[in-house]
Image (cartoon, rainbow, N blue to C red):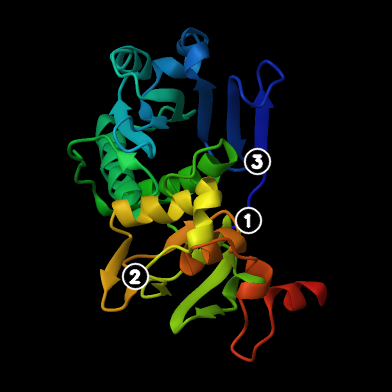
């Protein structure tokens, strides 16, 4: 993804409230707001244009992040129709300031965005299906560029639902593989800008330590991974069915160890250097 300069405007001077964002040399624009400022958002000129939008919140059944993706020729009218949905607490939409987004364009964007959100797997996608739209080759290429800009701006505005788990920078720290081994269990992972990712196929001990009961908050992520099918029993171990991202190396190691662990010591390079040793040399 190319480098970019972002212009972020805080309408009320508060980064959590109504705000707009744009990229240099791009005709698109993003507008975001919490649900508590819904009317102020709809009162803006941009809300009368065509575009794509995202409603974000928490899925009441699973407790996971939830996302709804939509499109409209008039965002204002379509968004009003979502007030009966109570899962969402934040809205974000994208428009083009040069009026070049047609109904076919926004339907194409909606279809691609739903597909990408489901592939990323970070949120429960509330859409039942994607509409999508066929476009001429030149228009399709233009919309793919628009999609790239959406990907650049969304995390800046607090929404990472399109970011694939484990993706991130290409620096040395992000690309270096690290290994965690205990009682015959072997796991592989690496640092990411969001924390730490344990790679698909890694193993975890089958049972929690007795001492883990004293720290329920630390072991809770492991139980959630088992419940949602990310960690499955295979032979004598639990195995990661997909990549799994954690807030820190220690959070990842705790899941693998079945109890509290210091990730700076648990994760090592193939030649035995701990993560702590690596970071001390940077």
Where is residue 196, by image quadrant? bottom right
Residue 87 image point, x, y percent: 35, 24
User: Which is nearer the N-term, disc 2 or disc 1?
Assistant: 1
Q: Are marks 2 and 3 in contact (CB under 8 Å)?
A: no
Residue 185 image point, x, y percent: 44, 80
Image check: 263 left or right of 145? right
Q: Nearer the viewer, residue 26 or 16?
A: 16
Residue in the image at 62% along x and 84% along y: 269
**Which residue is denoted by mark 2 in the rendering?**
238
**Which residue is denoted by mark 1 in the rendering?**
3
CA neighbours of label 2 inside 10 A, class few (<14), some (14 to 19), many (20+): many
Image check: 216 left or right of 62? right
Tell me if residue 272 can be seen: yes
Q: What element carries label 1?
A: loop
- Report, in whole angstroms, how far the alpha carbon at label 2 lies from the one at label 3: 43 Å
CA neighbours of label 1 inside 10 A, class few (<14), some (14 to 19), many (20+): few
Q: Is mark 3 on a helix, strand or loop?
A: strand
Closer to the eye: label 2 or 3: 2
Above or below, comparing residue 112 to residue 275 in the picture: above
Q: Is mark 2 on a helix, strand or loop?
A: strand
Residue in the image at 47% along x and 17% along y: 35
Closer to the eye: label 2 or 1: 2
Where is residue 251, by image quadrant? bottom right
Tell me if residue 163 can be seen: no
- Report, in whole angstroms, how far the alpha carbon at label 1 lies from the one at label 3: 10 Å
Q: Which of 256 and 147 is in front in this view?
A: 256
Residue in the image at 51% along x and 72% along y: 189
Residue in the image at 52% along x and 9% along y: 40
**Which residue is denoted by mark 3 in the rendering?**
6
């Amino acid at each position: 993804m190319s480098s970019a300069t972002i212009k972020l405007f805080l309408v009320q001077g508060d980064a959590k409230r109504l705000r707009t964002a744009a990229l240099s040399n791009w005709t698109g624009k993003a507008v975001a707001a919490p649900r508590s400022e819904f009317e102020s958002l709809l009162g803006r000129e941009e809300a009368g244009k065509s575009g794509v939008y995202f409603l974000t919140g928490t899925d009441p059944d699973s407790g996971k992040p939830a996302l709804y993706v939509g499109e409209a020729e008039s965002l204002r009218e379509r968004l009003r129709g979502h007030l009966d949905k109570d899962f969402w607490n934040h809205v974000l939409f994208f428009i083009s300031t040069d009026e070049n987004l047609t109904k076919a364009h926004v339907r194409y964007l909606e279809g691609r965005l739903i597909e990408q959100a489901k592939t990323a797997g970070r949120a429960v996608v509330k859409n039942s299906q994607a509409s999508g739209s066929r476009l001429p080759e030149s228009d399709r290429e233009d919309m793919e560029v628009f999609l790239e800009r959406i990907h650049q701006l969304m995390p800046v505005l607090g929404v990472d639902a399109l970011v694939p788990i484990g993706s991130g920078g290409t620096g040395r720290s992000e690309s270096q593989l690290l290994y965690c081994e205990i009682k015959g269990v072997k796991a592989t992972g690496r640092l990411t800008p969001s924390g730490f990712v344990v790679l698909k196929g890694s193993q975890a001990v089958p049972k929690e330590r007795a001492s883990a009961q004293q720290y329920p908050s630390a072991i809770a992520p492991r139980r959630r991974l088992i419940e949602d099918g990310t960690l499955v029993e295979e032979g004598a171990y639990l195995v990661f069915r997909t990549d799994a991202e954690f807030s820190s190396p220690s959070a990842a190691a705790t899941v693998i160890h079945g109890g509290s662990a210091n990730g700076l010591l648990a994760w090592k390079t193939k030649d035995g250097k701990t993560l702590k040793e690596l970071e001390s040399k940077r």
